[in-house]
Image: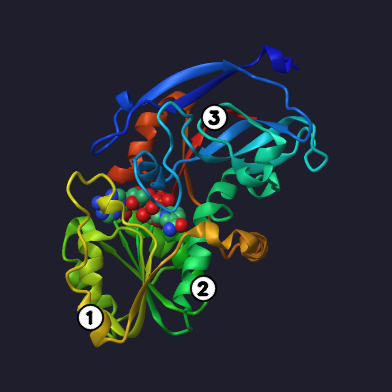
Amino acid sequence: MTAISALTNHQVCLASRPTGLPTRANWRMTTEPVAEPGPGGVLVKTLALSLDPAMRGWMNEGKSYIAPVEIGAVMRAGGVGRVIASQNPAFAVGDHVNAGLDVQEYCLIPEAGIKRSGIFKIDPSLGLTTWLNVLGMPGMTGYFGLLDVGQPKAGETVVVSGAAGAVGQMVGQLAKLKGCRVVGIAGGQAKCDWVVNELGFDACIDYKAGDVKGGLKTHCPQGVDIYFDNVGGEILDLMLTRIARGARIIICGAISQYNNTTPVKGPANYLSLLVNRARMEGIVVFDYADRFPQAIAELSGYLKAGTLKSREDVVTGLETFPETLLKLFNGENFGKLVLQVAAE
Ligand SMILES: NC(=O)c1ccc[n+]([C@@H]2O[C@H](COP(=O)([O-])OP(=O)(O)OC[C@H]3O[C@@H](n4cnc5c(N)ncnc54)[C@H](OP(=O)(O)O)[C@@H]3O)[C@@H](O)[C@H]2O)c1
């Protein structure tokens, strides 16, 4: 086994803030020696990283639900890895963990950073990348967004955009498990076919083929009780015209707006909330951190029973990070986008 002091940590740092879509020029590849953990600390070898649309927001200056990544800092990312050195009794060498590992090969978590990193042990037999998907942050987002904010009742109609993505696949499958009628919105026939044929959605509208309005009329004739919004923009505005009385709209994200160089496009049709006694409410997944263990226990049960599926789109190589991230914004990812950094 290689000594820790002989290891080199390759990292991807933020070099500048982008305008519009990020380019390779916004990143800088750096290296540093790997250090042993001090008392209470752990050293984790990164195996796979979660690439998330939110990363685009973290590259921006300005106030949000979390501080921006500083220029020159290693890019923030959640990931799964293996403990390779530990001075913390809660983590042994060889343990697999989920934590804020950032875009780098090795993550040294000092004792003072243990809580902030969100590190917890995971069961690799459920699939390492599953812990970045349905058992990870996107899964928790779909779970608490749908169940806590949306409060679905059996028989209601749920529409979810970004349906074949990480959050979307969780929302649709969970809504089916709760007895709802589920309609997805996704880009392209292959994604639509997958959510219907493999995940059991009742229908899916290909927004890239046009006529989302016609699709909603056909598949949601009584209106939409819950709209789980991952994309914002025109689709949100259109959805507002199709909601039923008492509808709940969960504002999870607005990926169609993240790379805008003009102001975010807000919904013109918001008065439909008034007419339909409906509401729109935002969700930030980290607010539910205390309840993740409860959600993970329930979702692991569904996974083991085969009633929940987890699809990941895995790209290999830390150095591909700048281009791989863009897959989220051009719709090339099919399932949860994961960057594999090391095999084991
Ligand atoms: N609030 C929270 O706490 C929280 C947590 C996690 C994620 N989120 C949000 O949830 C949303 C989904 O995240 P995810 O991780 O599950 O990503 P994802 O759905 O796995 O990947 C992004 C997908 O967005 C779709 N997309 C990209 N540009 C679009 C556009 N202009 N119009 C419509 N669709 C577009 C693409 O799918 P198509 O091929 O279907 O176009 C792409 O595959 C994002 O908005 C993200 O920011 C929020």
- Which of the 4 image quadrants contains residue 71? top left
Residue visible at 38% across and 47% down in the picture:
53
Give the distance between the C-alpha atoms of the residues marked 1 and 3, in whole angstroms.
Answer: 46 Å
Q: Which residue is nearer to you in this view: 321 or 198? A: 321
Q: Which residue is nearer to you in this view: 167 or 68? A: 68
Residue visible at 57% across and 49% down in the picture:
130
Q: Measured along the vertical axis of the image, is residue 83 above or below residue 337?
A: above
Give the distance between the C-alpha atoms of the residues marked 2 and 1, in whole angstroms.
Answer: 23 Å
Q: Which mark is residue 341?
A: 3
Give the position of the N terminus as an image quadrant.
top right
Q: Amino acid at mark 2?
A: Asp
Q: x%, y% of residue 155?
A: 44, 85
Q: x%, y% of residue 92?
A: 80, 36
Q: Amino acid at mark 3?
A: Val
Give the position of the C terminus as an image quadrant.
top right
- Residue pointed to by mark 1: 272
- Residue pointed to by mark 2: 148
Q: Amino acid at mark 1?
A: Ser
Q: Is residue 264 visible?
A: yes
Per the image, label 1 sits on a secondary structure element best described as helix
Question: Would you say 180 lies left or right of 8 here?
Answer: left
Q: Measured along the vertical axis of the image, is residue 225 above or below residue 169?
A: below
